[in-house]
Image: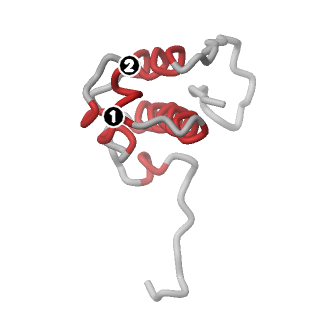
Amino acid sequence: MSKDQYEMGGYNVFEDLGLPNAKDHLVKAQLVFKIDTIMKERQMKQTEAATLFGVRQPDISKMLRGDFRQFSVERLMRFLVKLNQDVEIIVRPHRDRNHAPALHVS
């Protein structure tokens, strides 16, 4: 492929890369993005976040660099609650026949 050619990826880069549990990785990445955004808005240091979340600073550093395998979706949602965010889980019937049911973070 020349430098002028490219292939359009899908909605989920983890799926495009062929990673197992791609949908889970995407949800975690979206939650970590929210955590990172809030930390930046508050000018919160990683050490402060680590104390608030009850983890070590190197774990926060890894998480913010994309290595978040050690954290479950539930734990990341708890981090958001500790950042004074409401986290809602809404379950409703799937109605889009063109796409499979999925988890969304907004």
Residue type indicated by callout 1: Ile
Q: In which quarter of the image is residue 54?
A: top left
x and y, in percent, of residue 59 in the image: 27, 33
Q: In this view, does 96 lie above or below 93?
A: below
User: In the rendering, at what x and y percent does residue 8 appear?
Assistant: 57, 65
Q: Is mark 2 on a helix, strand or loop?
A: helix
Q: Which residue is drawn at 52% across and 70% down?
A: 7
Q: In this view, does 19 lie above or below 76?
A: below
Could you say where residue 95 lies in the image, as x and y percent from the top left?
75, 23
Secondary element at tag 1: helix
Q: Identity of the amino acid at label 2? A: Phe
* Relative height, residue 18 to residue 80 (above, below): below
Query: Residue 14 vs residue 59: left or right?
Result: right
Residue that appears at 38% across and 36% down: 46
- Return the residue nearer the eye: 33 or 105: 33
Taking the spot 34% from the left edge, 32% from the top edge, the residue there is 47
**Mark sitting on residue 80:** none
Around disc 2, counting alpha carbons within 10 Å, would you say few (fewer than 14), some (14 to 19), or many (20 or more)? some
Can you say which quadrant of the picture contains the C terminus?
Answer: top right
- Contact between labelled residues 1 and 2, with CB atoms less than 8 Å apart: yes
Number of on-image labels: 2
Disc 1 packing (10 Å; few <14; some 14–19; many ≥20)? many
> Mark number for residue 60?
1
- Residue 72: % across, % down: 36, 21
In the image: residue 25, left or right of residue 34: left
Colour convention of the picture: secondary structure
Q: How far apart are marks 2 and 1 (CA)?
A: 9 Å
Which residue is under mark 2? 53
Q: Which residue, as the protein is rendered here, is positioned at the far right?
A: 95
Q: Which of marks 2 and 1 is nearer the N terminus?
A: 2
Residue placed most toward the observer, 80 or 1: 80
Tell me the quarter of the image containing the N terminus.
bottom left
